[in-house]
Image (spheres, rainbow, N blue to C red):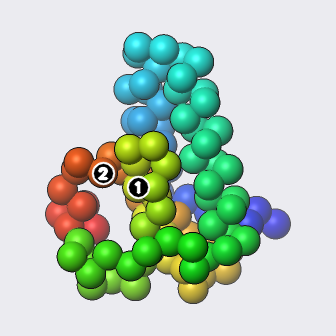
Amino acid sequence: MNPYILAPAAQRDLRALQTYIAQENIQVARRVLAEIRAACARLADNPRLGHAREDLTDQPVRFWSVRTYYLIYRPDTHPLEIVRIVHSARDIPHLL
């Protein structure tokens, strides 16, 4: 069983991120995606690593940074549900 799942929105986020970065450098895109997948697996093993961000949402989610991206996930789900993968400069409250 996979230790985490990507919600449909997170799947779209990951594809868009890959496409965007690959326009400049496909090798960098692969490295960033590998870092994100490794972080997802780490969070699945330790779901309390992330931080609650009450300034951004009152939803029961946590945030973990990978480069300039937030992994937004539900820590109490099994397997761990990654809700969104977004750039930290985006309007997070609007996206959630």
Q: Which image quarter holds the N terminus?
A: bottom right
For residue 24, say whether it is visible: yes
Q: Amino acid at mark 1?
A: Tyr
Question: Which residue: 23% across, 72% down?
Answer: 56
Which label is found at residue 88? 2
Question: Which residue: 41% across, 15% down?
Answer: 23
Q: Is residue 91 above or below residue 82?
A: above
Question: Which residue: 60% across, 30% down?
Answer: 31
Left or right: residue 71 versus residue 78 is: left
**Residue placed furthest toward the right:** 1
Which label is found at residue 3? none
Q: Amino acid at mark 2?
A: Ser
Helix, strand or loop at label 1? It is: strand
> At which x and y percent is residue 72?
43, 65
Q: Is residue 17 above or below residue 66?
A: above
For the residue carrying disc 2, how many other residues have a C-alpha within 10 Å: few (<14), some (14-19), or many (20+)? Answer: some
Q: Nearer the viewer, residue 51 or 83?
A: 51
* Residue under numbered circle 1: 70
